[in-house]
Structure formats: C-alpha cells, structure tokens
Image (cartoon, rainbow, N blue to C red):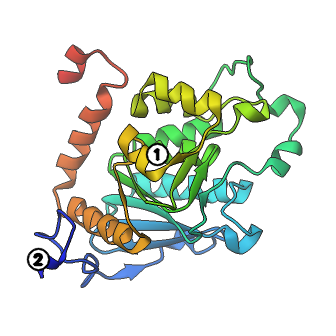
Amino acid sequence: KLEQSSSPFAVFFSPGDAFIGSMTFTPDFAKKYKTMKVTQHSNGVCVATMCAKDEVGLNLLTGRLFREFADVVEHVAVDDSVRVFVLRSSDEDFWMAHFDLHAIMKLPPSAITYPGDRELTPNTWHILCDRLRNMPKATIAEVVGRCGGGGNEFCMNFDMRFGVRGSTCFCQMEVPLGLSPGGTGCITLPGLIGPGRAFEMVLGGIDVDADTAERWGLLNRCFPDTASCRDHVDEFAARIASFPPHAVRAAKASLLAVERMPRREACL
C-alpha cells in the first residue's frame, strides 16, 4: 500500500515491486566474467554486481575487475535497450576498495605516475571514467560498504550515489601513501563537495561517513539499512527507465554541459 512506503516514488512503484513483471537475463558479453555479475531487465534497467570478493577476499580493484567493469561500461553505453545502469556490490563491507597495490608494485617504473608528473594523453582509466560520466543514460551507484581510492574515483563518475548509514564510507588515501589521486579524483571531487572539503578529504586522507557524505553532496541520500537503500535504488531506476529515453538523454547532456562550457553556451 502507498502509505507503507517511505520512498517518494511509491506513487509509481511499491517497495520490492520495481522489477515485478520484468524479464531478466544475463547478456552474452557478461557470461565470461569472474568479478562481475550482470543482470539486464526487460524494463530497461541493467544491474551490475561486483563480486571480486569471491576471487580475492574483498572487492579490491584488481586488473580483472577493472577490465570487466570497462567492458560492461563499453557495452551498456551503446545498448539502446539499456536505459539505466546500476552498480552495486555483493560485499557489504567493501563496495570497492583501493587499487590492488600488489599489481601496482609489478608495474614497470615507466608505467607509474608520481606526484608532480604530468601525463600528455588520457590513460585507459581516464577514458573509462569519461565514458561512464558521459554515458547517454542514467547511472546509479548503490554504495554499501567502504569506497576508497580508485573505487571512490569510479563512484564519483556516476550520476547519482545512494548509501547506508553506518556502512557507507568514502576516502581518498593516496596522499598519506605518497601518491596523488590521479584517476579523476582531484578533478571530480571539488565539483561535488566544493574545493575546501575536497582539500580536506584529499590532503587529509580522512574517512567520510554516510551522513557527512549526504550533507556534503557526495551521496544523494543515505538510508538506515541496506534493504531500504536497495528498494529505493530499484524503484528510482525503474522510474527513470519508464520515461522517454530521448528526454533523459537530452536532459543529462544539458546537466553535464555546464562542466565544460560557459553558462551562456550551455543554455543554447
């Protein structure tokens, strides 16, 4: 019943009913994945669930997870049957941890960028974040657990982020480790929470809990538990997917235009 739902979208969907009547399947391209499980719904919502914990003990940003996530983004971005892309985690302790430091140590010195170095062309990480950010459809990160370093940089490139009080936690810990957030963190974060708070988070290497993240703008909103967060994300994704895709695409392009052009040009 309508009065039983705390979601503002209950007028369209009842809790837990967002996918009732919707057929689901695993896309062919995702059947080979080891660290991602992808479910596509006939209502236009595609849900990817990170499950690297099954392979390495937690959702660590390994090379395999990076490649599979990049592959998901590449396919979803051009699939007109997908109207909303949702990313969530099977590990409630770690949504996505930092990049695998063991993998970094195996890289040749020429492949590592240190503070003060300047890359001349976008690397594969930057290209992925840009593709995710500019995907012509809505993207939602359901963030349950810790989200740090490269995981946070990926997360910030989603259109919207929802979390859980007492569970969701964000951090950029690179500076305390002698590194710099080079995966779009220093570029994206000030636009979300403001320059001062971005300095506090990056230079201080602090943890930001769900309530603070919601207040600062890093989360759209936080919920008391995982179940209510999941219900909200499912209902909201289904709501957006029910709208004309050309309208969603045009509105998103206008919202993003302000990031790369003066106000007068963005209005045209």
Q: Nearer the viewer, residue 158 or 222?
A: 222
> Sequence-wise, which precedes: disc 2 or disc 1?
2
**Residue at 26% over, 62% down:** 236
Q: Which mark is residue 2?
A: 2
Kind of residue indicated by mark 2: Leu
Image coordinates for residue 186, horizontal then vertical, percent: 56, 28
Kind of residue indicated by mark 1: Leu
Q: Nearer the viewer, residue 244 or 104?
A: 104
Asked if 142 appears above or below 31 in the picture, the reply is: above
Asked if 129 appears above or below 100 in the picture, the reply is: above
Q: Is residue 122 visible?
A: no
Query: Residue 112 is drawn in which quadrant?
Result: top right
Quadrant position of the C terminus in the picture: top left
- Residue denoted by label 1: 132
For marks 2 and 1, give the CA distance.
Answer: 35 Å
**Residue at 63% over, 31% down:** 204
Along the horizontal axis of the image, is 82 left or right of 213?
left
Count of number-bearing discs: 2
Q: Residues within 10 Å of mark 1 (few under 14, many from 20)?
A: many
Query: Residue 3 is drawn in which quadrant?
Result: bottom left
Image coordinates for residue 117, horizontal then vertical, percent: 74, 18
Image coordinates for residue 185, horizontal then vertical, percent: 56, 34
SS category of the residue bearing label 2: helix
Q: Residues within 10 Å of mark 2 (few under 14, many from 20)?
A: some
